[in-house]
Amino acid sequence: TLIRRMFRPIRLSLKRPHAVAAIVGATVILLIGLTATGARALENRWKDIILPGVSAGGIPLGEKTVETGAIALAETFDANVGAGFRFVSPTSEAVIPAELVGVDNPDQTRTLVQLDADATARAAMAVGHEGSFLHRVADALRVAVDGHKIPLVVRVSRQDLISALAERFRAEETPVVDAALRFEKRDGRPGFAIVSAHSGKVYDYNAAVNALEAQLTNGDLSNIQLTLRDAAPVVGDGAVAAIISGAERLIARGPITLKDPEGKTWTVSPDM
């Protein structure tokens, strides 16, 4: 019937298999050529522009040049850090500004945090613009689908920041006391006694600065918690006890001059 004829199976007879293979091969080559041509055209379009989907520290940089990307980075970063950085201890909190202005001399400003906007923009431009042609195409496809995040290139003046934190939170710490010698007279005779060492509890400022650096590179600022850690004395009682006998022998021979770690000196003698 007509319906059976319409749905009758079609049987193909390949009388020239070599010709069919040649057609398939030519088609594949044509598709590869068209794909390569399209990829090359896209690459030329984004030659001097950061690929869409690239961001640094949460700041979109796609379709910007290195110059305009650096400007966008600097403006956004300055706005983000303008309010300073909030450090929180168990009993208080403090905001440390990105720039410390000298109390006695306002011209002596110390910059605690600085963004290298040019280096960050160049790193963003490198995405999809380096390596072989196939590598660049693969990077471009990956960025188009998933995006690409790079860290901000930020420099932190660690020692200045640690000094600022210590100045603000030192009153909450239990200071460490190193063992020391005390000159005294016992039964009318000069001698030395041990001033015992004591452990303390201090804030881990290095860990706090590390946390700030991680936040800055990711562009996600939040409160930074300060944690207390146990701190042992550098000089213990045993180290001081080991030098007492030698010090007493020296003073028995005559006056001796002592010097503390801060450079102060004083003289002791048997008749003091």
Image (spheres, rainbow, N blue to C red):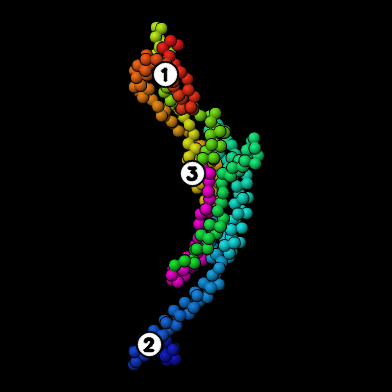
- What residue is drawn where x is 49% and y is 67%? 129
Reading the image, the residue beneath label 1 is 256
**Above or below, 117 relative to 249:** below
**Quarter of image, res 257:** top left
* Real-space Cα separation, disc 3 to disc 1, in angstroms: 46 Å
Residue positioned 44% across, 79% down in the render? 32
Mark 3–mark 2 distance (CA, rounded to whole Å): 63 Å
Q: Which mark is residue 22?
A: 2
Find residue 254 and report its horizontal and vertical position in percent.
39, 15
**Residue 248 placement (x, y as % from top left):** 36, 16
Residue 159 is labelled as: none
Disc 3 residue type (three-letter): Asn
Q: How crowded is mark 2: few (under 14 residues within 10 Å), some or many (20 or more)?
A: few
For the view shown, which residue lies furthest in the front direction?
Answer: 254
Mark 3 closeness class: few <14, some 14–19, many ≥20 residues within 10 Å: few
Is residue 90 found inside the magenta-colored segment of the image?
no
> In whole angstroms, how far apart are the C-alphas of marks 2 and 1?
104 Å
* Residue 132 drawn above or below residue 113: below
Q: Earlier in the sequence, mark 3 or mark 2?
A: 2
Left or right of residue 179, residue 123 in this image: right
Q: Please tell me which of labels 2 and 1 falls first in the chain.
A: 2
The C terminus appears in which quarter of the rendering? Answer: top left
| Badge nearest the viewer, 3 or 1 | 1
| Element carrying mark 1 | strand
What residue is shown with label 3? 210
Left or right side of 105 for 170: left
Residue that appears at 42% across and 18% down: 256
Q: Could you tell me the amino acid type at mark 2?
A: Ala
What segment carries the magenta color? 132-158
